[in-house]
Image (spheres, helix red, strand yellow):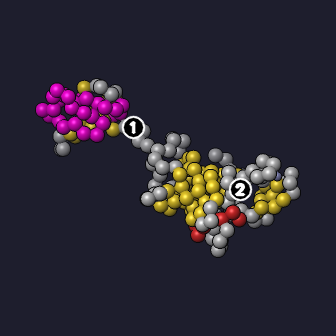
Amino acid sequence: MTKNIEVFPGDEVAVEEEYLASDGTFAEDGKIYASQMGILVLDDDECVARVISPNPPNVLRIGDTVYAVVSDIRNTMATADVVAKDGTKRGLGGETYATIHVSKISQGYTDDVSKELRKGDFIRARVTGISPSLQLTTKDDHLGVIRSLCGTCKTKLVKKGKGLYCPECERSFSRKLADDYGDVKL
Ligand SMILES: [Zn+2]
């Protein structure tokens, strides 16, 4: 049963005659102590004492929508650092280094990653794989670049046609844009 008691590391939570130490607990001299902060669970079916964390790491799952910053462009993929998961303010646990394969960037055929994404672009993406490494896609209309700065003058690029435009340099750039580029409230 869950007693809903908040315990701290080192708190005595049970005795070994009744329970075995398990996740978040340890046994010493016949007594069981909490090894982490959390909620005490005394499981009478399995006879184990657990302390579960009220804030488990926010690990990414397949299908999650995330925000990421493009960190590098290579021949067949882009790499990105995931900085947030859509719908939560909690920090991310686990792997945040992700790859986006060239075939998963846009709906049309692309053989040049740098026509779709550039280093420093802020993107919205969806998780398509978590093992052996984090993999993302930006294929859908609502996915892709949501904020980008000019590589030359750092001016915020504006949407123009299907691509981006720097009003300072008066140059156009191609990108895989999200449908709400420039109008994103985080
Ligand atoms: Zn510029």
Is residue 156 part of the magenta span, yes or no? no
Mark 1 crowdedness (10 Å alpha carbons): few <14, some 14-19, many ≥20 = few
Q: Residue at x 12, y 32 (%)?
A: 17
Identity of the residue furthest to the front in this view? 75
Q: Position of residue 185 (x, y in %)?
A: 67, 47
Residue 175 lies in quadrant: bottom right
| Residue 19 located within the stretch drawn in magenta | yes
Q: Could you tell me residue 182's position as x and y percent? A: 73, 53
- Please state which amino acid type lies under the numbered disc 1: Pro
Q: Secondary structure at mark 2?
A: loop
Which residue range is magenta in the image?
13-39
- Pointers 2 and 1 in contact (CB under 8 A)? no
Residue 19 shows in the view: yes
Q: For ligand 1, tell me if the residue under mark 1 lies within 8 Å.
A: no
Residue 22 in picture, x, y percent from top left: 24, 39
For badge 2, the amino acid type reads: Tyr
Q: Residues within 10 Å of mark 2 (few under 14, many from 20)?
A: many
Rounded to the nearest angstrom, the CA distance separating label 2 from label 1 is 36 Å
The residue to which callout 1 is attached is 54
At x 28%, y 40%, the residue is: 23
Which dot marks residue 181?
Answer: 2
Tell me the SS state at disc 1. loop
> Relative to 28, is 183 above or below?
below
Is residue 139 something that shows in the picture?
no
Residue visible at 44% across and 59% down in the picture: 132
Please identify the quarter of the rendering in which residue 41 is found: top left
Where is 11 relative to 101, above or below? above
Q: Please identify the quadrant where the N terminus is shown.
A: top left
